[in-house]
Image (spheres, rainbow, N blue to C red):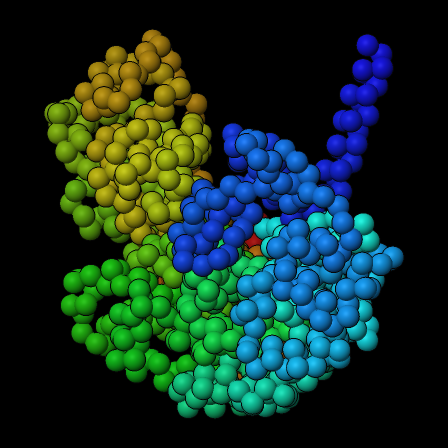
Amino acid sequence: MKLLFVAISSLFVITSLDQADSSYYDKIVIHSRIRAKDKGPNVCALQQVVGTKKKYFSTCRNWHQKSICNKKALVLYECCPGYMKLDGGRGCPAVSPIDHIYGTLAIVGATNTQNYADRSNLRREIEGEGAFTIFAPSDYAWTSLNAEVRNALLSNVNIELLNTLHYHMVDHRLLTKDMKDDNNGMTVSSMFNDLNLFISHQKNGIVTVNCARIINANQIATNGIVHVIDRVIKAVGSNLEETIEATDELSSFRAAAAASGLFGTLSTGGRYTIFAPTNEAFDKLPREVLERILSDDVAMKALLHYHILNSVHCSETIMSGATYATLEGTNIEIGCDGDSLTVNGEKMVNRKDIVATNGVIHLINKVLIPDAAMQILDLVSSKQSTFSDLVKDTGLSAAFTDADYTLLVPLNEAFNEDVMAFDQRILKVILQNHILKVKVVLNQLYNGQILETVGGKFLRVFVYRTAVCIENSCMVRGSREGRNGVLHTIRKVIMPSENSMLQILQDDSRFSIFLTLIESVGLTELLTEGRDWTLFVPTNDVFESLTPNELEELTRDKNALRHILLYHLLKGVYIGDGIEYGVTNVLKSYQGSRVMIKLVNNTMLVNNVKTKESDLLANNGVIHVINSLLFPKDLPVGSDYLQRILSKIIKYIEIKFIPGYTYTEMKIPIFTHIFKSNITREIGTTITRVIPYETEVREFTRIVTTKPEINIIRGRITHSGRIEANVEAADLAKLIEGGTQFSKFSRTVEGDPNILDDVEIQKLLQGETTRRIGHFDSRTPAGLRSSRHARKLRQRKRKPVRA
């Protein structure tokens, strides 16, 4: 037993080491053996492309698709390499006999190579002592060779044919596991003048030598290894630059490469694959496009580098579509369709596998233009053609110069009848909302960012887990960066709102009852403030079961009603398209309890209550219309009358009742206004002193005007989204207190209209230097604030505003 255990353990260790040292080719053969295990020992399953002699130890992908290069593939069962059948036996139970290389050529079916070894006097060498590896062309490879070339070889067997066969050999043993490939291939010296052979070993198990595929590998001989390949290979002595210069069909590509300095790269180290456009391909380009690219060094470099891969890919290594990185930085897809190579899904390869010492060239009949070499309007796809047409029709396309822009391009279906019904003047304004003055790529966008359009409008950015939205429109995957800007695809036409949430509620009669409740507890100010909110608003029909007296009773407990109403309010803007589909989003309401939002069948659910209408965008948030009043599940009711009323209009949950329960005081936020500004002091028309005054803007609520002595204009929004006003009350007072005369002010003040009321200004104008400035409580009804604030300024002492 002990000896048996040791034997089994030794076998396991040897097997593990063998697998660890196995190559991609070896692993594919193992998988083929497993697929054919029911056919007997040492049988491998292969796929043969219908209508050809091509056979492959296939990958899992090709096996399950039952095709190779989009062509139907039949399943064959043959002996695995190194094994053979016995008469009447099942499977392939016998190993192939071991002979010298000359004899092994017959065993693997390379009889033409064996015959040519006889005729060229190579036989004596490969029957004798030594260690060799020969890459032996199959019989089909010799018959497929150009007749003129084959006749030239056979007419001079002692030199040309012998040299050719020596070029197929190396002077040491080389198994597929020894053919390492770090994506740049490997080189070995042949036995003909030490010229190199270029080997590529791909992850799909394909091994090539100078782009000839090994179709039967690792046949052991007494004096070496035999690999059968699918074509006769030719000696290679020129690098990529020299090969391009010697190819007449590439004179246009050669001129562009020379002008851009690309030849410096292609003449030195590295291993590359070049998809080189022919002269005919360059002739197909529109003249203005070609001239623009040729005159732009950056665009030309991008175009040329887009045709080059930093790895070697012979045509025989491509069995299905895959993406590869180009020197330009973006990817292209290389695939196959029968015997043809495809690039980005198109058949365009005229000539394959021109091997050079540092790579391979495939000739293509189309110039590939990367996004980086294209103008931004050229990036618009057919699915966005409506936008492109409108930009041209309205004359906006003429505005695109060499400066960088960002286009926010809606899909065609976004331009519905309502949008297209606008006249051209309004359409031009709408289109300007989709053009930004600067280039902003996707990874530069962040939540709360403010973007300025060419029309002077400001757009807000909202970033979610799986979406990025700009105002009411969310992006579709597939942003593209061009030579003079970047293009983002969006779902809807952007319509920036001019109104606050309060104005939207006031203008829509469906919300009159909810608005009345908001006003009854002093929350209207909250809906006008310059913050980002999400508000769920029930329509009037939600309250239709209540009598006028019950509606009045609902407002009896102000604090309880505030809890209920503020449960409908969330901090942050949550657009319907920005919500991750099918996933519950747990958010916190302004009241403090959790709100559950979910998107199902393109409908937003809040606490499982369906929205009737989504995304009524305001300049300070978004409104979603719902068909029920919301109530916190964890919040009880402490009075009979409130439970009775709420139970009539809230059906989606059962409201808890705890007699005598009282709510915590629900405080309403007080918004303060601190400005960053620059004050210019004028005497007559001469500027005598500039007083800098910088603080942070925390909140910004309203735009105001004052007496004619102070002219009001708009401020500007900084990169961070804050407002910069050009005048602040303290500086205005400071200037007036200075004692010198002035003629006028023409600066911007945006904020509280009562920072300096009429009385204070009059005092300062009359020479009194004392000033008092205070903040207001936003809970005060808007109609009373001006007069009450003025009285408070006169009646109580206030601290001065801090810089």
Is residue 754 rendered to the left or right of residue 18? left
Regarding residue 63, the answer to whether it shows in the image is yes
Q: Residue furthest right?
A: 129
Q: Nearer the viewer, residue 165 or 407?
A: 165
Residue 84 location in percent, x, y?
Answer: 62, 40
Q: Position of residue 122 (x, y in %)?
A: 77, 68
Residue placed most toward the observer, 328 or 335: 335
Quadrant housing the C terminus: bottom right
Q: Is residue 357 visible?
A: no
Q: Nearer the viewer, residue 196 or 664?
A: 196
Q: Residue at x 62, y 55 (%)?
A: 109
Residue 397 spot, x, y in % from top left: 35, 81
User: Where's residue 106, x and y in %?
Assistant: 66, 55
- Residue at image position (39%, 65%) is 408
The residue shown at (25%, 80%) is: 393
Instruction: Tell me how many marks there are.
Output: 0
In the displayed structure, 711 sits above or below 54; it is below
Please tell me which residue is depicted at 51% across the width and 63% down the height of the picture.
Answer: 334
Pick the quarter of the image with the N terminus.
top right
The residue closer to the viewer here, 441 or 772, is 441
